[in-house]
Image (cartoon, coloured by chain):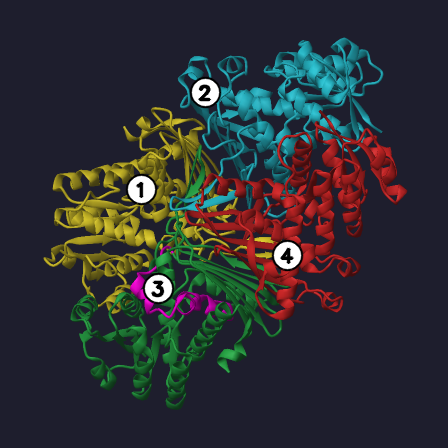
Chain colours: A red, B green, C cyan, D yellow
Amino acid sequence: MTVRFGLLGAGRIGKVHAKAITGDPAASLVAVADAMPAASGAIAEQYGCAIRTIEEIEAASDIDAVVICTPTDTHAELIERFARAGKAIFCEKPIDLSLDRVKACLKVVRDTKATLMVGFNRRFDPHFAAVRAEIDKGAIGTVEMVTIISRDPGAPPLDYIARSGGIFRDMTIHDFDMARFLLGEEVAEVSAMASVLVDPAIGKAGDYDSVQVMLKTASGKQAMISNSRRATYGYDQRIEVHGSNGLVAAENQRPVSIEIASSLGYTRPPLHDFFMTRYTEAYAAEIAAFVAAVSGKGKAAPSGEDGLAALALAEAAVRSVAEGRVVKLSEVAG
Amino acid sequence: MTVRFGLLGAGRIGKVHAKAITGDPAASLVAVADAMPAASGAIAEQYGCAIRTIEEIEAASDIDAVVICTPTDTHAELIERFARAGKAIFCEKPIDLSLDRVKACLKVVRDTKATLMVGFNRRFDPHFAAVRAEIDKGAIGTVEMVTIISRDPGAPPLDYIARSGGIFRDMTIHDFDMARFLLGEEVAEVSAMASVLVDPAIGKAGDYDSVQVMLKTASGKQAMISNSRRATYGYDQRIEVHGSNGLVAAENQRPVSIEIASSLGYTRPPLHDFFMTRYTEAYAAEIAAFVAAVSGKGKAAPSGEDGLAALALAEAAVRSVAEGRVVKLSEVAG
Amino acid sequence: MTVRFGLLGAGRIGKVHAKAITGDPAASLVAVADAMPAASGAIAEQYGCAIRTIEEIEAASDIDAVVICTPTDTHAELIERFARAGKAIFCEKPIDLSLDRVKACLKVVRDTKATLMVGFNRRFDPHFAAVRAEIDKGAIGTVEMVTIISRDPGAPPLDYIARSGGIFRDMTIHDFDMARFLLGEEVAEVSAMASVLVDPAIGKAGDYDSVQVMLKTASGKQAMISNSRRATYGYDQRIEVHGSNGLVAAENQRPVSIEIASSLGYTRPPLHDFFMTRYTEAYAAEIAAFVAAVSGKGKAAPSGEDGLAALALAEAAVRSVAEGRVVKLSEVAG
Amino acid sequence: MTVRFGLLGAGRIGKVHAKAITGDPAASLVAVADAMPAASGAIAEQYGCAIRTIEEIEAASDIDAVVICTPTDTHAELIERFARAGKAIFCEKPIDLSLDRVKACLKVVRDTKATLMVGFNRRFDPHFAAVRAEIDKGAIGTVEMVTIISRDPGAPPLDYIARSGGIFRDMTIHDFDMARFLLGEEVAEVSAMASVLVDPAIGKAGDYDSVQVMLKTASGKQAMISNSRRATYGYDQRIEVHGSNGLVAAENQRPVSIEIASSLGYTRPPLHDFFMTRYTEAYAAEIAAFVAAVSGKGKAAPSGEDGLAALALAEAAVRSVAEGRVVKLSEVAG
């Protein structure tokens, strides 16, 4: 069986998914929709698929699944429409910036029994997935402490920041999902601290650019996250998990792994400078996992509920910063 | 000029300092005092120094400086006595577990104009010192975020834990000092989380064995600390500092740096299994710095005030855990 | 312009090139030929290309270039035929096991002015290419000493070994090419030592499985090569170049870059276990370079002369082992 | 029992041994002899030992052992004199530059049943010793291929080179000993290549500055050595051993193990810049091993015969370069 795809949104991340779909022997890209004809046209030409409207894709009998890459504020509505239309849905994170809106959307997904997968691509990075696999194998015993350091090469444009929902909902949300993925137990408490250290303009836009977060589960497992919107040495993405029998860690990835020695010392080139080159393999594996789920092989995960849980952690972090205290998840997600 | 030493306390750490003193061409070990004759006798025999009482050392004209390695609850009183006796004082951390007692002690030090240095040995580790030196050179621009991971190979005996003052005052205190050393700005806010994950008996003794802490300075600089009383792979001591122009990090130290490859992968031996072998160089450098200060070359640092500041951070962490909120340093150290 | 390809040979390496061609936007795979219908059929089905005979591809007006992946003993003849047919030619190494046969073949290539590129894929590995780029940038000054360690995960089947031309012509030849690529000056002298340490059956088949080679150029630049047919820890492929101002090295590649710490130490998973996964990126970059050359952008390199030069080094190594002496290239390639 | 030492020669390496002897609780430094009063005086003052003539040390009843650190051309005669005087002898390498002279000297040692240990300090480096220990434990199966890369930070003065016996006898000799130590089987064949790449003046002095050597044992085990008199990045000392079940390697040592990341990449400081700081621990362990042997605990190794064997390899390498062929050890050491 080949899973036949409609692609909603032909921007930067839409192109990534188009490449992943067409590179997967178990999938085919049937149609693309985008408000900008130039964007959909480029994908249609490169991959030989049709250009359609969203309505046409909704009604199409030759499409099994959609990938939603449109702007964030359209995600929840599109999920609901395509759930009702009987399509399997892969949606880029976040489902929505409002917890209530996400909950309402997920009710529709449950009621229609739709297949929904949310785009937390990092779970599919082969190195991070290997960390999780080692935990599952028992290599480090019981998980106790997770450490996540996640720093972007540079801050996004200010207008993006203004509508991003803030650093916790936009950037840390990946790390919240990763922390849940690695802890293997729901987070019960959140404490966060936030600063503007990179660019005062980000502060004026009402956001932070440097944050740190602590999480704790009911049984006492802990996680720490450090985020900065700027790292001069590239895309800094490290995770490690300390357990009762040891530690497992994934190191940073480099586009070129050479080392140059001179009188100044030993130098390796910087890290990847862009999330798309850093996570190339993850995007392909993510679509492959979705295709497998749609084909009845395995569950669609991370699920809508995973998306909701990560957003609730972001909400709790925002509140923790505002009120200078530890916030219980039950206050937010109740 | 040779600095002539009296050693107070001939236990484990006393032996370390005896070795450091006798290995330093600018220092000599004149006498040792210990309540246990076997302990002082061993040092006297190995290094050819006299055995004296504390009172005799206090009154001795052939002694310039003392190293205090006695039990914690005697530190403050001994500092005061030797300050009044006109001796330079090196005291193992902590000065006392009570902030008020430390403050009273430091008043005596100030009034007597005594030289006092506190044993935060990690500042003298050549690798950590090199991190600080790179910051001073401007290699990473402005300091923004400090990350400290500090885990012991195994927990101390329960009776030690019972009188230790708790993990924040006993173990994290080193990391509080390191965070201050690296941040270069006083901490204004503390948030901490604590669990018992390693040994329930530690919990029954009223303490925690796994903690994480976030610090923030007035200007928004951040630090994260992760502590566990147990790491199967050895003495895990990592620091890194992220700044506006880059990052500087000190990796773990290993007693043997070989790698073995086989069908199971590439394996390096575990880390040091004991703080004394891990910090051998630091202990020697620490005494050398004290000797230099006593000889009029440079200041005695870390000072008593550094000891007080680290203890105040521990106090704030304890309160943060108890009250589930961010604690301002002004509440504690006021 | 799209370069239209005919693929000759649909075995293991043929499939690799089919994937590279179809994944290159500037290339298309028009037809495949193989004596085994099952092999050509599999590629034709996967990529939607035609199945043709070699003769049909030779005569086809819709084909610009061929990739020769047939058995070694057909390479030289096919190169000559397709050179005369006016096609651009990419040929897997080696052109032939006989130096004289290669020379005769290259004469035809010169006479027909055909474009010929030989498949030394390692030059296109991004890490090895980055080493060469650093040399070109002057990062290490003048090249002085090259060190190449190249070990296979396991020995090929004995029947392969019997017709391989021996380890120097089959395996070390990649390292000879890499040494020439990195030295930047022709080799003048060769000394080699060879043993059977892995499998006595390889010795009975008249070959060696463990060899070491030294090379020297006229100006005194040096290179060392170490080869084994077996490495339990995976596909060991390291190069380093020492120069007047420093050293540049490419480390081994790993499919997963995680590290697990326990009481046994720190362990990273083994290396790649197969040359095709190790050199995935190199195969794609190699075809892209050929496509560029055929499209008039850049030269076809490595050339037939590079293939001849590497084979001459193998010939000299064979003679050095047989005669227990340093062999001058002029004796072999004269 | 304390081993009582006389030190012959108070130069650079003599000071190293004086420190090692006085730092060893099982040894004491009784006297020092040197033709230069300033040199012996410095050691006598620092460590409180006597200044004596060589004759006095020879006749002294309060001296058990001597350490010979005088110029190379005096070694053999001093070994013979002190062997006859009944002293245990530690002699810096080489015993002599002439194979015949060494053989004659070792005959005296055998006849007098003297204890003789030769100063191949690298065997006592904790990292190299750990490599050998892993081999002994069977971690890599049967040893097959040894790779040694050994480069000095800078060339010695020309007048030193002139009387050094040439790079093979002066510098490579350490690697010859290390190869024997790691191979665990006597070398049967040697092939060497030599160039002048670092400094033409070295060539004018009749020596080389860049050499590579291949060794082979009777059973086919192999070793490669690469030497340069100059490495801009510090004292480059790497060994690795490939075996039937895996590989074990010792990486370079660094005085400070930090890493700095910036937009230029990740940089670690250079290696040690001097053999004495690189091998500090080795020199202490070497004297400890000699003290143990003199005290009847264990054999004195490396022995005089080890010194002879390494010198024979150097002799063979010299001949290999001169004659452009593989030289059998039996030709040299016969």
Return the mark for residue B18. Answer: none
Say which amino acid is labelled 4: Ala
Mark 2–mark 3 Cα distance, whole angstroms, equals 67 Å
Relative to D220, does residue B98 appear above or below in the rendering? below
- Of residues B83 and C161, the one drawn nearer to the viewer in this rendering: B83
2 vs 3, front mark: 3
Residue D56: x and y in percent read: 14, 59
**Quadrant of the image containing the C terminus of chain D:** top left
Q: Which residue is mark 4?
A: A333
Residue B16: x and y in percent read: 30, 66
Q: Which residue is mark 3?
A: B205
2 vs 1, front mark: 2
Mark 2 and mark 1 on one chain: no
Mark 3 and mark 1 on one chain: no
Q: Is residue A142 visible?
A: yes
- Of residues C59 and D49, the one drawn nearer to the viewer in this rendering: C59
Residue D64: x and y in percent read: 14, 54
Mark 3–mark 1 Cα distance, whole angstroms, equals 69 Å
Local packing at callout 4 (Cα closer than 10 Å; few below 14, some 14-19, many 20+) is some
